[in-house]
Image: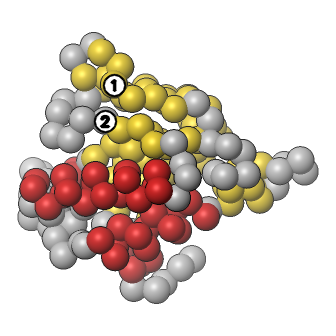
């Protein structure tokens, strides 16, 4: 699993000119599902994401969590996070999960975040989407295989 978290003041996702999901203060989450990912993988990554303290406190230190600031989530599936560009000039996506399994885990990720008490809106799985955002910072965090291996920086 690969998760790109952008701290935003606001973000929205559109399909064919219609806004289908949006968030105010919170995270724009780009979610890539890889081969071999499962429900435990989802819980591990979601729990880490939801506990991150990347919002400023009263002293300007990144010390507050999404819950502390009452933030929401806009979760967008993005298989291209699994692009392998090591050979040639055309990316390979063979390490991405199958579309069927990726959709299941994307929906499970969103449902899990909601069950944890967070408002979560989504894009449309498999659709061509346009995303607009006001990145706050900018502040971007990437969670990838090193998290699952127990390597945290």
Q: Residue at x 25, y 60 (%)?
A: 105
Quarter of the image with the C terminus is: bottom right
| For the residues bearing labels 2 and 1, Cβ distance under 8 angstroms | yes
Q: Nearer the viewer, residue 28 or 146?
A: 28
Mark 2 or mark 1: whose residue is earlier in sequence: 1
Q: Residue at x 30, y 15 (%)?
A: 18
Q: Position of residue 36 (x, y in %)?
A: 18, 76
Question: Which residue is denoted by mark 1 in the rendering?
Answer: 20
Can residue 119 be seen here?
yes
Real-space Cα distance between discs 2 and 1? 7 Å
SS assignment at label 2: loop
Q: Position of residue 8 (x, y in %)?
A: 57, 37
SS assignment at label 1: strand
Can residue 87 be seen here?
no
Question: Which residue is denoted by mark 2 in the rendering?
Answer: 123
Check disc 1: other Cα within 10 Å, few if <14, some if 14-19, many if 20+. Answer: some
Q: Position of residue 149 (x, y in %)?
A: 39, 85
For residue 94, side relative to residue 117 (left or right): left
């Amino acid at each position: 699993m690969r998760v790109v978290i952008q701290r935003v003041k606001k973000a929205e996702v559109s399909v064919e000119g219609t806004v289908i999901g949006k968030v105010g203060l919170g995270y724009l989450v780009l979610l890539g599902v890889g081969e071999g990912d499962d429900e435990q993988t989802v819980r591990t990554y979601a729990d880490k994401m939801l506990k991150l303290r990347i919002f400023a406190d009263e002293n300007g230190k990144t010390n507050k969590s999404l819950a502390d600031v009452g933030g929401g989530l806009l979760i967008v599936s993005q298989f291209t996070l699994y692009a392998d560009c090591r050979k040639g000039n055309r990316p390979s996506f063979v390490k991405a999960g199958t579309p069927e399994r990726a959709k299941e885990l994307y929906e499970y990720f969103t449902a899990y975040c909601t069950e944890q008490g967070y408002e979560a809106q989504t894009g449309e799985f498999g659709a061509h989407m346009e995303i607009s955002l006001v990145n706050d910072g900018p502040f971007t965090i990437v969670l990838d295989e090193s998290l699952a291996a127990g390597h945290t920086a």
